[in-house]
Amino acid sequence: MTTDRHTDFNDHPKRDVAPSPARVLAVALSRDALAQTPRHVLAPDAEMVLSALAQVGARDVTGPDAPGLILAPLTAKGFDAMDLLATLTQAGFGDRVLVLAPHVPDVPLVRADVLAQAPTLNVDVIALDGSSALHLH
């Protein structure tokens, strides 16, 4: 007896499933800080989850409920983005990370430092002073 694995798949009608909104994890950011984020960064229907660094663990950033985007400040009171990047690397986070900086005189230098800290992550630095390319459109 032979089994065609494709038969079972084809016997089920396709279901129209509405895509769920993009999940965004904002670590150590206030709503005021998020309001400064360039408008092109977040989808209008994004599901925003605010969290402190101490609350971010492997379960929060992996699996079916993992965020598609993580936002974090470069630095904040009791917070450094490099610590978060180390946590995300260890957890095996596979999506995008944007590090937000209020004003950085040399964004390429900061970006190089961030990328050196987390070479396996899809990470970038956005200056919130309006100089980021995301602000120009």
Image (tube, rainbow, N blue to C red):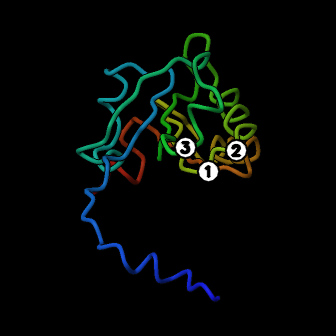
Mark 1 = which residue? 94
Kind of residue sitting beneath label 3? Val
For the N terminus, give its image quadrant.
Answer: bottom right
- Relative to residue 58, is residue 65 drawn left or right? left
Residue 64 lies, in percent from the top left, at: 51, 45
**Foreground residue, 25 or 136?**
25
Residue 29 lies, in percent from the top left, at: 44, 22
Q: Residue at x 62, y 29 (%)?
A: 81
Kind of residue sitting beneath label 1? Gly
Q: Nearer the viewer, mark 3 or mark 1?
A: 1
Relative height, residue 105 to residue 16 (above, below):
above
Label 2: few (<14), some or many (≥20) within 10 Å? Answer: some
- Relative to residue 133, is residue 104 drawn left or right? right
Residue 126 lies, in percent from the top left, at: 48, 42
**Mark carried by residue 92:** 2
Q: Secondary structure at mark 1?
A: loop
Disc with the residue nearer the chain's start (3 vs 2): 2
- Relative to residue 15, is residue 105 drawn left or right? right
Relative height, residue 99 to residue 55 (above, below):
below
Mark 3 = which residue? 97
In which image quadrant can residue 102 be found?
top left
Distance between the alpha carbons at the discs numbered 1 and 2? 6 Å
Distance between the alpha carbons at the discs numbered 3 and 1? 9 Å
Label 1: few (<14), some or many (≥20) within 10 Å? Answer: some
Q: Secondary structure at mark 2?
A: loop
Distance between the alpha carbons at the discs numbered 3 and 2? 13 Å
